Amino acid sequence: MASVSPPRYCQSCGGALLPATPHADKKAPYFCAACAQPVYLDPKVAVAVVVRTGGGIVMLRRAQKDQAHGKWILPGGHVDRGEEVTTAAVREVREEIGLEVELTKLVGVYSYPDNPWVLVVYEALANGGAPMAGDEALEVAEFAVEDIPWEDFGYQSTADAMHDLLDDQG
Ligand SMILES: [Zn+2]
């Protein structure tokens, strides 16, 4: 997922945040220069979906110009605060590849050291719409399992989730 900018201002008083010194509470990476309040950083939650159609598994080539640009990824994105994760999954698939889906199973939850993102991955069956590239995709394609572009994935989590799902099914 995209990188997360560090916070700059205190949510209590609007004062500037400073990095905590090494001998301070290590769990609070910032403190407010004005009110001295420690500032904790929560993980960010994202969701991705392995969508199965009659043609295989639907993936998209990422349009955004970042380190995963042009690589194959699963449809997915941020979970909004207060939004059910399952609702976000269905919404992101609709927005990114134009398909309606029914979630069928939780594939896994993926997180990595020094990475703020926690990724929840579901498997789903397409039950409406037709695959099409939204604004965030250069291309959308359906891959038979034997044709999955393992060497051209945008994220470690894509490979980890696909392995967990497909190794499971033999
Ligand atoms: Zn403050």
Image (tube, grey):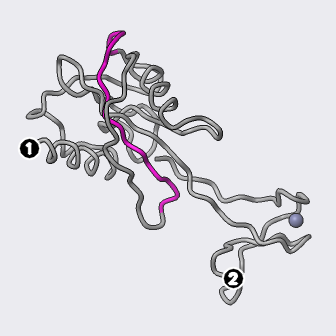
* Marked residue nearer the N-terminal end (1 or 2): 2
**Which residue lies most toward the front here?**
104
Q: What's the CA distance linking mark 1 and mark 2?
A: 47 Å
As drawn, 17 above or below 59: below
Direction from residue 79 to residue 30 in the image, left or right = right
Does dot 2 land on a helix, a strand or a loop?
Answer: loop
Q: Which image quadrant for residue 60?
A: top left
Q: Which residue is mark 2?
A: 25
Which range of residues does the magenta coloring cover?
A: 115-131
The location of residue 104, given as percent across then percent down, is 32, 30
Seen at 83% across and 56% down, the residue is: 11
Depth check: give the residue in front, 23 or 105.
Answer: 105
Seen at 8% across and 34% down, the residue is: 146
Q: Main secondary structure of the magenta part?
A: strand
Name the amino acid type tagged 1: Gly
Name the amino acid type tagged 2: Asp
The location of residue 118, given as percent across then percent down, is 47, 53
Depth check: give the residue in front, 142 or 69.
Answer: 142
Depth check: give the residue in front, 170 or 92.
Answer: 170
As drawn, 142 above or below 49: above
Mark identifier at residue 170? 1
Residue 130 lies in the magenta stretch: yes
Q: Residues within 10 Å of mark 1 (few under 14, many from 20)?
A: few
Seen at 33% across and 44% down, the residue is: 154
Residue 164 lies in the magenta stretch: no
Q: Residues within 10 Å of mark 2 (few under 14, many from 20)?
A: few
Does dot 1 land on a helix, a strand or a loop?
Answer: loop
